Amino acid sequence: MLQDKDTTGSSSGGWAEPRATAVLVLQDGTVLEGFGIGAVGEATGEVCFNTAMTGYQEILTDPSYAGQIITFTFPHIGNVGTNEEDIESVNAASSSGVRGVVLAATITEPSNWRASRDLDAWLKARSIVGLSGIDTRALTALIRDKGMPNAVIAHDPEGQFDIEALKAKAAALPSMDGLDLVPLVTSAQRFDWDETTWTRGEGYGHQDGAPKHHVVAIDYGVKRNILRLLARAGCKVTVVPATASAEDVLALKPDGVFLSNGPGDPAATGEYAVPVIRKVLDEKIPTFGICLGHQMLSLAVGAKTKKMHQGHHGANHPVKDKTTGKVEITSMNHGFAVDPETLPSNAVETHVSLFDGSNCGISLTDRPAFSVQYHPEASPGPQDSHYLFDRFVQLMDGKKAKA
Ligand SMILES: NC(=O)CC[C@H](N)C(=O)O
């Protein structure tokens, strides 16, 4: 059912049923009709719901969402427009992150001093197909009942849809289970990063003074704010593509290796990433992983990952650090999880989700390596530092002190 007023310019006095200009067709044949926003055309992906109330631009530019369509549970998305700065992907290829977006309310005029473009035009420029005006609460409830469905989202200003063909297309899409999507978003070339965090009136800063440690960040779909926090913590950062070999990484003589977040099934990406990570671990190089990086560090020590029913996507996920007993409200975006039952004896579970008890972090006992499932660089709280980045620096300090 359409839930908004007639915006189609119908001359029938406004009483006619407004024509749908976008549809979301799920793999089970469910058809949701709404108003088209963003790019015109069709996109396919797995539908997940995100519960964050702010940060939609960062979410929509997170390369970890490649191959997915996001439905926001917060109804008013777009009110503060978009700007040129709050983009998380590091390269143009990463604009092919999220494929589609589903909103409850119509996008309003942007109201924010930093806004340079309204969300609708911005979505169009980034080729993201969108739909607004549906009951996103019902869609979220459906995902909670049945798991994340594959779907086709289609936007046509003329409202011409071949629903049967879209149903067939949605039903034929491959499951996210087994998909390696990192090649869609990783950087093609190595590059250096020295941008630090944002301050009002000054924007993003740049590293000043000699960096203390050299970190090689393997880019499976890295987010800018992770790189900024590494730079701010005093690291010279070299970002390498996901296809870099262990020799490429070791030739850079890193004091530490960072394993980034990224899209798709970790087990599929692990096929080429795991051998590289194992060699880095053999060299006893301090290693820190976030999200997909956490899953791949776990795979590298022999643990297994599994697909989740609905995943965790939002900014209010409580996570307990078992080493300190402290609970942190975190930002998350994952549809796979490490099975803690499969962790070997040299991997200790350090963090757990207080929503469902799922694994959210490990630390190795025989190597200077640890990782977390959540996004510390995007979690509520001070945006320019996080204790896990300090922990990584301490590991690198310790390694140097021993040498
Ligand atoms: N944010 C991420 O790195 C996501 C990791 C992985 N693609 C998952 O869905 O679980």
Image (spheres, grey):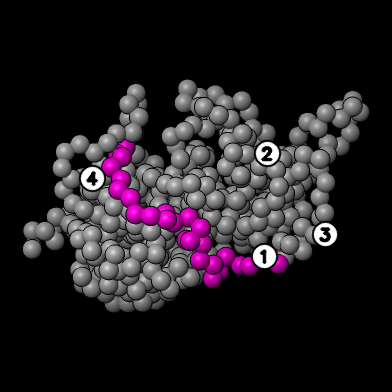
Name which residue lies at 42% across and 58% down.
220
Q: Which residue lies furthest to the front in this view?
A: 189
**What is the crowding at mark 2: few (fewer than 14 residues within 10 Å), some, or many (at least 20)?**
many
| Image disc number at residue 164 | 3
Residue 312 seen from this side:
no
Per the image, the residue denoted by label 2 is 37
- Amino acid type at image mark 3: Glu
**What is the crowding at mark 3: few (fewer than 14 residues within 10 Å), some, or many (at least 20)?**
few
Residue 168: x percent and y percent?
77, 64
Residue interval drawn in magenta: 172-198
Q: Quadrant of residue 217?
A: bottom left
Residue 90: x percent and y percent?
42, 46
- Cα separation, mark 3 vs mark 1, equals 15 Å
Which comes sooner in the sequence, label 4 or label 1?
A: 1
- Amino acid type at image mark 4: Ala
- Cα separation, mark 4 vs mark 2, equals 40 Å
Name which residue lies at 73% across and 62% down.
169
